[in-house]
Amino acid sequence: MNVVRKIIEKTGWPRLIIGLFLLSLFILAPFVGVKISTSLKDTVVRFGMNGILVLAMVPMIHSGCGLNFGLPLGIIAGLLGGTMAMELGATGPISFFIAILIATPFAVLFGWGYGALLNRVKGGEMMIATYVGFSSVAFMCMMWLLLPYKNPTMVWGYGGTGLRTTISVEGYYLKALSNFLKIEIGGFTFPTGMILFVAFLCFLMWLFLRTKTGTAMTAIGSNPVYAKASGIKIDRIRTISVILSTWLGAVGILIYQQSFGFMQLYMGPFYMAFPAVAAILIGGASINKASILNVVIGAFLFQGILTMTPSVMNSIIQTDMSEVIRIIVSNGMIIYALTRVVKGARK
Amino acid sequence: MKEKAPLLEMRNITKDFSGNIVLKDVSFSIEPGEILGLVGENGAGKTTLMKILFGMTVIHETGGYGGEILLNGKPVMYSSPLEALDDGIGMVHQEFSLLPGFTATENILLNRESTKYNFVTELFGDRMRTLDRVEMKERAEKAIEKIGVKLDEQTLVSEMPVGHKQFTEIARELEKSNVKLLVLDEPTAVLTESEAEILLHSMRRLSNEGIAIIFISHRLQECKDITDKILVLRDGCIIQEKATSEISVKEIAQAMVGREIKASLRDEARDIHKPLLNIKNLWVDMPGETVRDITLDINEGEILGIGGLAGQGKLGIPNGVMGLYNSGGEVLLKGEPIPLNNPLYALNSKMAFVSEDRREVGLLLDEPIDWNIAFSAMQVQNRFLKPVFGGLVKLRDEKAMEEVADHYIETLEIKCMSSKQKAKELSGGNQQKVCLAKAFTLEPEVLFVSEPTRGIDVGAKKIVLDTLKRYNREKGTTIVIVSSELEELRSISDRIAIVDDGKVVGILPATEPSTAFGLLMLGTVNNGEAAK
C-alpha cells in the first residue's frame, strides 16, 4: 500500500493518468483497425521531431526565466540557417549541419538581445516572452518577402522574389538524420539517427547542468537572492540560458524539418512554443525546476497522445475528423498543462 | 467531571510524518484568560501541535493525527484553519503572512473589511460593495491600540521594520470580535527588548479580558514573566507541566534540553591590535536598517560584536560590505580597497557572510543540504568540480559535496535524514547550522554573522555560538557578529560596537557591564525622540 502510494507520488497523478490513457489507446488501436506498427512509428518519429524543441525549455526554466514562450525567435534563427544553407547551394545530408552552423550566430545574437530584454522585466518574463515570439514572427513575415533569396526552389514562381510559405527540403537535408542507420522491421521504421542526435543533445544538456555555470543557473532559478549573495552575476547567467534556449529552438526546428520534409515560413513558427511548453509541463517540470527526464517523458506522452487519439477516434466514428480532434486534444492538453504551472512554483 | 469544561483541551495527541514520530501522547488544557507557555527545542513538536489544532492542510495530507481536541467540552476536528478561525481561535505565525504591498489597515481587516452599499451590488451581489475606508481606519486604530503600540495604520507592510510587521499581524487577530484563544508562535523573536515589553504588556491585558493565550517562545525569561502555566515539550513528549510560579528559568531550560547547562564562561580579555578591515564613512541603503556613516576598524583575529536596537542600521553593515545592498564609502582589507556593490569581489577577498534572512538569502530551500553548503565555494573558489573527458569539461563533484556536507552534519550536529534532504524540510536551528557550514566551507579570513541565533532554541544557540568561538580560536578567523541580544554578544565577543541611527555611538570591551551598553543604545534614542 505504502509502496504503491510512493510510486504514485513520485510519478505524479497527471503523468500516471495520461500514461494509462496512452496505453489504453495502444491496446484499443488494433481492435478498431489501426495498425500498431504504424502508430508506434508515428509516435517515435514525432517524439524525435519535437524532442529538442521541448529540451529548449530547460535552460530558461533553470535560470528562473520561466517557460520559453519566445521559442519562435529561436525557430526563426533555425529557418534563417536552413534557407541560407539552401541558398548557398549546400545539398545532401551535409547541408543539415551547414544549416546549424549558419543558424548559430543568428541564435546567439537573437538570444542575447532577447535575454537583455528579459533581464529588464524580471517577474514578467513569460508574458514578455510570448510577445517577443509573436512580434518576431510578424516582423519576419515581412522579411521573408524582402530578403534577396534567389534559389528557384524557394522563391515564388510567378514574381521571382520572396520566399514561398512552404519549401520542400528534398534534395537538401530531407531525412538527413532519420535515414542514418535506420532500422526497418515490417511496417515499423526506427529513425535511429534522429533519436541518437536528440539523445546526444539531451546528454550535452545533462552535462551542462552539472558544470559550474549550469549549477549556478539552477541556483538562480531556485533562489536568485542566494545566488547573488554567492557572487553570481545573475543577468549574465540568465542571458546564457536564453541564448542556449534560442539555439536549441533553432536546432530543434531543423531536426523537425528534416523529418517532416518541409520548412514552414511566415506564420509557421507562430504556435510552435505552446506544444513544447505543454509537453515539458506534462513531463513533470514546474516553473523553475525541470530535468532531462521531464523532457523525455513529456515529449513522449504529449506526442503519443497527439498521434494516437485522432487515428483511433477516426476509426471508431468512421469519419475523417483527425484535424479537429488533433486541435481539441493538443489545445486541451496545453490548457491542462498550463493549469499545472502554479504547483511547484515558488510561493 | 468538573463543574465547567476548560476552554480548550487536547487529549492524547499523536502525530507522525511517514513513520517519524513527532508527537507522542500529548495532553493539556487551557482555561479562559489563562496564558500557557509552550517551550521546547526546535523540532520538539511545538509548531506541529499548533498546526494540528488549526487543522492545517499539511496535517491532513500527511495522514491526519491521533487523539482528540475539545473546545468548551465539545470535540472538534478542523479540516481547515478557516473553521478554527470561525470558532474564535487566532494564530500569529512564525513567518509573516501579510501582503507586503498593502497597508497595515488593509492587512488587519483583510476579508473582513467594512463596506458600503453601492448600486452595483444589486447586480453582482455583496462582493461588489465598496470599502468604507473611514470606518476601516477606525477599526484598525482600535486594534492597534489594544496592543498599546505606536503604529501608523497607513504604512505599507513592505516598508515596515520587522517588529511592526509582527504587531500588524497580532492586531489582525485581535480585530476579530469573537477571538477567545490566541496562539502566538514566537512573537518576540524578531522584536527588540522594548518592543517585546510592549507586547508582553498587551498580552497581560488581553488575558484580563478573558482571552486565553498559548505563547510559544524561546526566550525563557519572558515565559517565566508572563505565563500562568508552562508546558515543556521535548522530542514530542510533554516533559513538564507546572504552574509558572513553581518553576525557575533554569529548571525550564534543563527540562527542554534534558542536560545540564553550564553558564558559558567568558574568556579573559585578549589583546588584539592589528587592524585587518577598515570601514570608512560607509553608508548602506538597506530598507529598515539604513546605515548613515559608519567608521569602524576590525582587528585581525578578534570577535567584534555589533549591537544596537532594531532598525538602527546594525544589520546594514555586513549587508553593505558584502555588496548585497547599494552602498558607498570606503572599505579596506589589509590596506587594499574592496569595491562595494560587488558580492563576488567581496567573496574572492576571503570574506563570507551568514545572512540574518535565512529563508530568503541564506538558503536554497528547494535544494539538498550538500548543495547549500558547497554552492558558494564552487562558484567562488572553483572547488567541488572534477574534470571529465580528459579535462575537457569540469562537472560537479557530487561525492566531494556529500563528504563536506556529511562532515558538517556531524560536527555541527545538524539533525537531518541525509545530506540529500532539502533545506526547507529542516527546522530553523538546523537551517542556521547549514548557513554557517556554507560560510565555513569558504574558509574565510573575515566572517560576518548576522543574527545567528534569531528564532532558534537554546541547544542550537549554544552549538552555533560555540562553533563560532572555536572557529575563531582554532583558525584565527576574524568574526564580526551582529545581534540584537546583548548578552549573547557579551558572551562571545572581544569588543562590542553599538550602532544607533546608522552611526557607531561607541565601542567598548565586552567585559563592561551590560548597563554601559544599554546606556549607549538608549542615550541617543531618547535624544532623537526629543529632537522630533
Image (cartoon, helix red, strand yellow):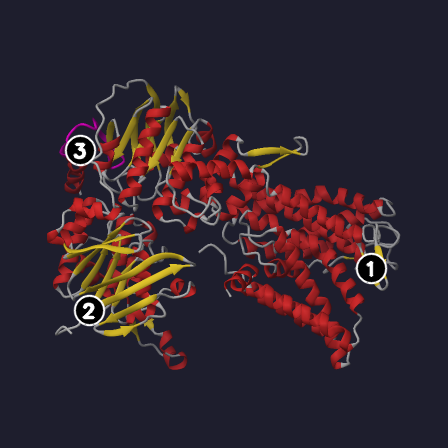
Q: Judge if badges 2 and 3 mark residues of a common chain.
A: yes
The picture places residue B404, in percent across and down from the top left corner, at 47, 35
- To which residue does mark 2 refer? B7
Percent of width and height locating residue A74: 68, 50
What is the spatial separation of the Cα atoms under label 1 and label 2, in whole angstroms?
A: 74 Å
In percent of the image, x 33 and y 70: which residue is there?
A: B78
- Foreground: disc 2 or disc 3: 2
Estimate the x, y position of residue B298 in percent, counting from the top left: 31, 24
Range of magenta residues:
B498-517
- Evaluate if marks 3 and 1 touch, with contact meaning CB atoms under 8 Å apart: no
Circle 3 residue:
B517
Q: Amino acid at mark 1?
A: Thr
Left-right relation of B91 to A315: left
Q: Decide which of A78, B487 is in the foreground and name it.
A: B487
- Separation of disc 3 and disc 1 at Cα? 82 Å
Observer-nearest residue: B74 or A318? B74
Residue B154 screen position, x and y as percent: 28, 57
